[in-house]
Amino acid sequence: MLMRPTVATIHLDRLRKNVQWIRAQLNPHVKMMAVVKADAYGHGAHQVAEAALEAGAEFLGVALVEEGMALRRQGIRAPILVLGQVPMNQVAEAIAYDLDMVVFDPLTFDQAVQAGQFLHKPVKIHLKVDTGMGRIGLWPDHFDRVWIERLRNPAIIFQGLMTHFANADAREERGTKEQVQRFLDVIEMCRENGLEPPFVHAANSAAALKMPGTQFNLVRIGIAMYGLEAYAPMPTDLKPVLELTSQVVFIKTVDEGFAVGYGSTYITEKPMKIVTVPVGYADGYRRGLSNRAQVLIRGRRYPVIGRISMDQLTVGMGIDDPVAIGDPVVLIGEQGGESISADDLARLLDTIGYEIVSGLSPRIPRVYGN
């Protein structure tokens, strides 16, 4: 079946180069986890996982057991860590599919031990400590003799000790440094009791690149791998991996005073061309971008006018501006020396680039370029 004109092109060559550049910034002993949760932030988990591993990543990170299971079914054999809470009814599946688990509460720990014994399989756990994020994780002062004895249980493999930073992308590093100190206290307590897991990890993209002292021996790289802003200003060596493009499907000329779209939120101030593009909020191109965003046509910027509909949007052009049906329209990407990034769209919505790319609908075909 032929594809619709609106497509997301995923440049895997750029992703590989991003991974290689990031690896070059890491301390020599540090390994890299490529975070491919949420379908690799909308880029396609299987394809991105393979490309990242080829480029030098050693681990993969997902949010859900289902995401890890899907990668295993697609032939991925690299270590996969489920970064989120593993529901009790999925613990056995996580073990059966050889997924590393984040553990931070006694009930899940006990369930993992029982399931591993029943399946006759090792249970690889990463103990998560909450040093200041306020989400899942064991409070540092709750890491006591009972937990030390749990981690000595021969039915489990204490694979990792981890935490997560709340403000690694901020200019002010004090909060992150305080979290690091709390984490170091737990690391030291482990060592004093003969517990030294193979992997100690805390750094996301921002921390890994801005604060090398947070790298420990494993970093979790997500947004930077996709060439989007982990913090500002981001290194120019990292290139956006995803482009979102469509086509002009209809052109009409209107007079001054014409009301465009639902709610008539845009009134033309002079005669102009209105171009229809077949992409809308059901595709993940957010309705909040109405009368705010721009697109690229023939290398020039043009405004999105009127409300974005579920399946279409309209673009305003000068009466004499050249355009033809079938002309490419760039919503995210580059054309003729101009560029629009997911981060640009995010700023218009007071959000982050993560939300823009991970929110692109599955009904947009993904096309992969090597």
Image (cartoon, grey):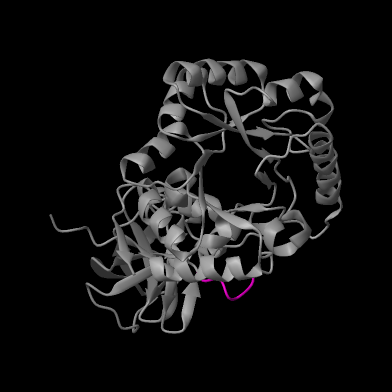
Instruction: Say which residue appears at 45% left-offset and 22% top-offset.
Output: 120
Q: Where 153 falls versus 61 (above or below)?
A: above
**Residue 107 figure quarter:** top right
Q: Is residue 321 magenta?
A: no
Quadrant of image for the N terminus:
bottom left
Instruction: Say which residue appears at 51% left-offset and 58% top-offset.
Output: 57
Residue 292 in view (yes/no)? no
Q: In the picture provided, is 367 more to the left or to the right than 13?
A: left
Q: Residue 119, position in %: x, y?
A: 43, 20
Residue 183 in view (yes/no)? yes
Q: Residue 212, position in %: x, y?
A: 75, 62
Q: Where 217 falls versus 336 (above or below)?
A: above
Q: Residue 2, position in %: x, y?
A: 15, 58
Is 350 or 31 nearer to us in this picture? Answer: 31
Q: Residue 300, position in %: x, y?
A: 42, 80
Is 313 or 264 nearer to us in this picture? Answer: 313
Quadrant of image for the C terminus:
bottom left
* Predominant secondary structure, magenta span: loop
Q: Is residue 238 magenta?
A: yes
Instruction: Say which residue appears at 52% left-offset and 65% top-offset.
Output: 19
Span highlighted in magenta in the image: 234-239
Q: In the picture provided, is 112 more to the left or to the right than 367?
A: right
